[in-house]
Amino acid sequence: MFNPEIESMDRSALADLQLERLKATVKRCEEMVPFYRAKLREAGVSWKDMNSIADVARLPFTSKEDLRENYPFGLFTVPTRDIVRIHASSGTTGTPTVVGYTDRDIEVWSELVARALVSAMADSSDIVQVAYGYGLFTGGLGLHYGVEKLGATAIPISGGNTKRQIRMMVDLGTTVLCCTPSYALFMAEAAEEMEVDFKQLKLKSGVFGAEPWSDRMRDRIEHILNLSAFDIYGLSEVMGPGVSIECEHKEGLHIFEDAFLPEIIDPSTMEPLPVGEQGELVFTTINKEGMPLIRYRTRDVTSLIDEICPCGRTHVRMRRVRGRSDDMLIIRGVNVFPSQIETVLMQIEGISPHYQIIVERMAGLDMLEVQVEVSEEMFSDRIRGLEEWQEVIQAEIESYLGIGVLVNLMEPRSIARSEGKAVRVIDNREI
Ligand code: DLL
């Protein structure tokens, strides 16, 4: 059975456990993976030098590029005969990256996801609709095995076929919905068309992640879907969903520190940053067999909160991911995260939660356009005042970001919907 008590473990006992696991991980990498052996030697460090958790900072980093260069199995610590499952990253460009899991890894992962579900208020009596994609993406199968480990009932519906999703929710009495936040909103539209009222459904929790979303978006989703929405984070390289999740207090996502050692670094100097400062999230996996990773650079931008949470969990929290450092737009020298624009938009009444950001370069100057849909009611009410309203929204975004933008209010349902990760940014500058 899984062990949620580990999350309220005394910090010094946790540090001992982490050190033991860190040592074993580095030893494993050193002995079994030529890539790591060479890297560790070059850095002049060995598993034998790990005397405290802080020594993790002496280890070399691993990047997405390293995974690509060792494609497909170069970072595995076991022969493929001992690998029971493969997943691949969702990257759409370049060489894909694959990850391999041993039997034990699947066991650990399932336990972590079961613990994540508990954090999202689920228990064995729940009916969980897993609407993340099943397949190479870790979302579907990752959640699925966690649901079974918890002893709850899984509906393995995967993404897509939105009307059937609603049908299942109604007929089977789904209590927990797992999907991307953008897909949850898409489902809400389908429900409206089918004249299904979420207030009549049994949904109590939503386990939403795999893409950045804001607190304001959460408010919208909770209101529309009539459930409590929890942010779940993970990445395939490190494991998949279930690296961290919010508890009922929703003030940061508890990282499952018995399995992942987090650090925040300054991406320009690669130096660790003090707790609380925002930078790039780095993970060392300390309870993985098939493909452990040392100091993996996630490119996700966030900060850590190292205070005991009122829920009693002692594990460190990460703030919601702001965005990826490679998604950060630099517009005329100003750093802009799509989530900042989302925060402004979601505060404005009459705006739908569907938006897209388009970046163009015109005569050498970067132009940022925000396309956002107006809600159905507002569209018919304000058709004449739209231009004025556009300017008001534009001014709000401009004052928040400190740069000029162009806002275009769009007709309801004119922006493409997604059944998985939403495409928020279209950057036409390179073309
Ligand atoms: O998205 C795993 C996952 C599945 C997480 C289902 C949560 C739920 P990848 O496809 O490898 O794995 O993408 C990982 O997605 O580095 C982040 O940039 C982003 N991401 C994942 N969860 C969140 C989140 C899965 N809660 C990449 N908030 C990560 C913001 C997220 N970004």
Image (cartoon, grey):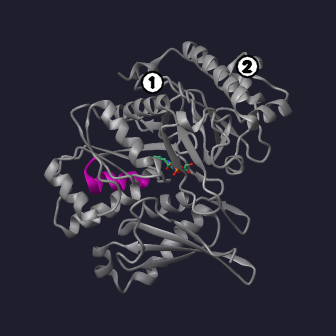
**Secondary structure of the residue carrying numbered label 2:** loop
Which residue is located at x 49 percent, y 61 percent?
Answer: 342
**Amino acid type indicated by mark 2:** Met
Rendered location of residue 234, percent (x, y): 51, 43
Image mark count: 2
Q: Is mark 1 within 8 Å of ligand 1?
A: no
Classed neighbour count for the residue bearing mark 1: other residues with Cα under 10 Å, few (<14), some (14–19), many (≥20): many
Rendered position, 386 above or below 300: below
Q: Nearer the viewer, residue 295 or 39?
A: 39
Rendered position, 187 above or below 233: below
Q: How far apart are marks 1 and 2 (CA)?
A: 26 Å
Rendered position, 354 above or below 91: below
Q: Is residue 135 left or right of residue 98?
A: left
Rendered location of residue 370, percent (x, y): 52, 72
- Provide the residue designation for mark 2: 50
Q: Are marks 1 and 2 in contact (CB under 8 Å)?
A: no
Point out which mark residue 428 bears. none
Q: Which quadrant holds the N terminus?
A: top left
Which residue is located at x 18 percent, y 46 percent?
Answer: 202
Q: Is residue 225 magenta?
A: yes
Q: Does the magenta stretch include residue 251?
A: no
Residue 412's quadrant in the figure? bottom left
Any part of residue 310 in sight:
yes
Query: Over which residues does the magenta segment extend?
Result: 216-227
Which residue is located at x 64 percent, y 21 percent?
Answer: 24
Point out which mark residue 313 bears. 1
Residue 383's quadrant in the figure? bottom left
Q: Is residue 143 left or right of residue 161?
A: right
Classed neighbour count for the residue bearing mark 2: other residues with Cα under 10 Å, few (<14), some (14–19), many (≥20): many
